[in-house]
Image: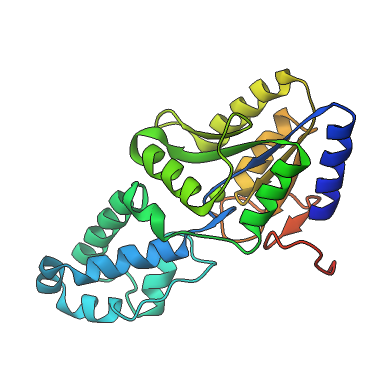
Amino acid sequence: MLEQILVSIQDLTRKGQKSLVVFDLDSTLFDVSPRLERILLDFAAAPLNQKLFPEQVTLLKNIKTLRSDWGIKGALERVGLDGHHVEFQEAIKDYWQKSFFSNHYLQFDNPYEGALEFVNSVESAGAEIAYLTGRDVERMGVGSEEIMRRWGFPLNDKASLVLKPHRSMDDAQFKTDWFIEADKKGYSKIYFFENEPVNLHHLSQFCPHVEMIFFESTHAGKAEPPEALPRIMNFLLNQKES
Ligand SMILES: [Mg+2]
């Protein structure tokens, strides 16, 4: 699957044709569960929270997030924090939202296996690259660029980072609109790696020729992934087909 994409890109490059590979960031290139865990542990470490919510904070200190976590609900439930204490739930939800969508905590994300190598191989094969994310410029622009560079993801005139100009924009609409514009730029082939089924369904209505690859990590649970799409769980090359 991934190998075939690289070969196709190389063929197009050899023929002088342009190709584009688009990657979502959160839960596609990056595992955000370490970010989530760090936020919850920082909440538990704050003296004020220890004073206000002593029992909850004691449970919170043992928290472990999983790749499959979406938001904080599941992780909290696993340590026995099941939503009964309203003030605690509101305080931690506020803290999570403020922290998760911020520059500061992006440093705790980890690229999925093979992600860095694959993106660099795509660049070497001659495709243009875009990181198309639902993160917004105001809250996460600076940190996103800094962290991409720190990990060694290509960022240059052929590899661009595209964030939402404003947080209020709908992710699926924002991404589809971007693809409609990209479509006018003469690419022979466009690929899109994405973990959120809602975004894939929306895009497929407007740009059915974009080759979409579903990244199976976690998602909002608002839609099932399109059946016909290829699925991957990491970016490692030369895996046995299952
Ligand atoms: Mg995502």
Residue 72 in sight from this viewpoint: no
Q: Position of residue 96 (x, y in %)?
A: 31, 57
Tell me which residue sits at (43%, 65%) in the image: 34
Residue 113 in sight from this viewpoint: yes
Q: Quadrant of the N terminus?
A: bottom right
Horizontal side, residue 237 vs residue 47: left or right = right
Comparing 112 with 219, the one in front is: 112
Comparing 237 with 229, the one in front is: 237
Tell me which residue sits at (49%, 65%) in the image: 69
Q: Give the mark count.
A: 0
For residue 33, above or below residue 61: above
Tell me which residue sits at (68%, 63%) in the image: 233
Horizontal side, residue 236 vs residue 143: left or right = right
For residue 149, above or below residue 177: below
Q: Position of residue 228 (x, y in %)?
A: 81, 50
Q: Position of residue 68 (x, y in %)?
A: 54, 67
Q: Quadrant of residue 112?
A: bottom right
> Residue lying furthest top in this view?
184
For residue 186, above or below residue 106: above
